[in-house]
Image: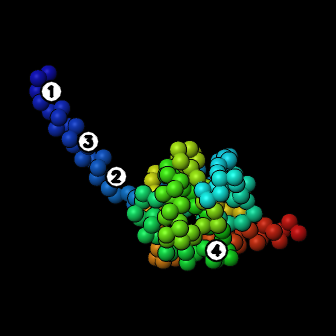
Amino acid sequence: MNRLKLFLPLLLVLLLGIGLFFGLQQDPHQLGLTQQDKPMPAFIAENLSAEQQSFSQQDFKGHITLLNVWASWCPACKSEFPFLQQLNHRPDFKLYGLNYRDNRRAAQGVLNTLGNPFLGSIYDPEGKLALELGVYGTPETYLIDSHGIIRYRYAGELNQEVWQKEFQPKIAVLQKLSSSTQESSQ
């Protein structure tokens, strides 16, 4: 029994090492998405820039949407803003923001300073919507189809390489599906 107690710490270290080994093999940008292929959660939340206006899950229907989770305290979020500015003029989707666990004034200050790439930004000061979406941190970007169904999530900063590799092919598929659905309903 005493010998077993001597090997117990070694066994625990070995198990921890095995867990770390497999954990480090995972791509941190490809985190599991519990909401994959499920509708946007039901919500009503304020618009960051216009408190009297609100958003709901209905705002994500009828068009392909990118929902970018960001915060004023997030350096990576700020560094991706120039790329998001390039995306906000594209006709094939709408770009919205989800301001996560932030101070309204600080967030508005970032938008005023760096430019606002979003059609609108959902204000989520307590992170309730983010929690329902399964947000791990900032920045994250969700791809939502024209029916309001979450199809993809990318954890990390968006840039041209990520855009071309991860998002463009998926948006092209969603556009084809959307156009074929419209043709069959006519």
> Where is the C terminus found, in terms of image quarters?
bottom right
Q: Residues within 10 Å of mark 4 (few under 14, many from 20)?
A: few
Q: Does 128 sit above or below residue 88?
A: above
Horizontally, is 144 left or right of 109 in the view? Answer: right
In three-dimensional space, the C-alpha distance between marks 4 and 3, rounded to whole angstroms, equals 44 Å
x and y, in percent, of residue 41 in the image:
65, 47
**What residue does disc 1 label?**
5
First along the sequence among labels 3 and 2:
3
Secondary-structure class at tag 3: helix
Residue type (three-letter) at the residue carrying disc 1? Lys
The residue that mark 3 highlights is: 15
**Mark 2 falls on what kind of element?**
helix
Q: Position of residue 133 (x, y in %)?
A: 56, 49
What separation in Å lies between label 3 and label 1 (alpha carbons)? 16 Å
Q: Earlier in the sequence, mark 2 or mark 1?
A: 1
In space, the residues marked 4 and 2 are separated at their CA atoms by: 32 Å
Q: Earlier in the sequence, mark 4 or mark 3?
A: 3
Identify which residue, 3 or 35, lies in the foreground: 35
Residue at 78% x, 67% y: name it.
181
According to the picture, the residue beneath numbered tag 4 turns out to be: 172
Q: Which mark is residue 23?
A: 2
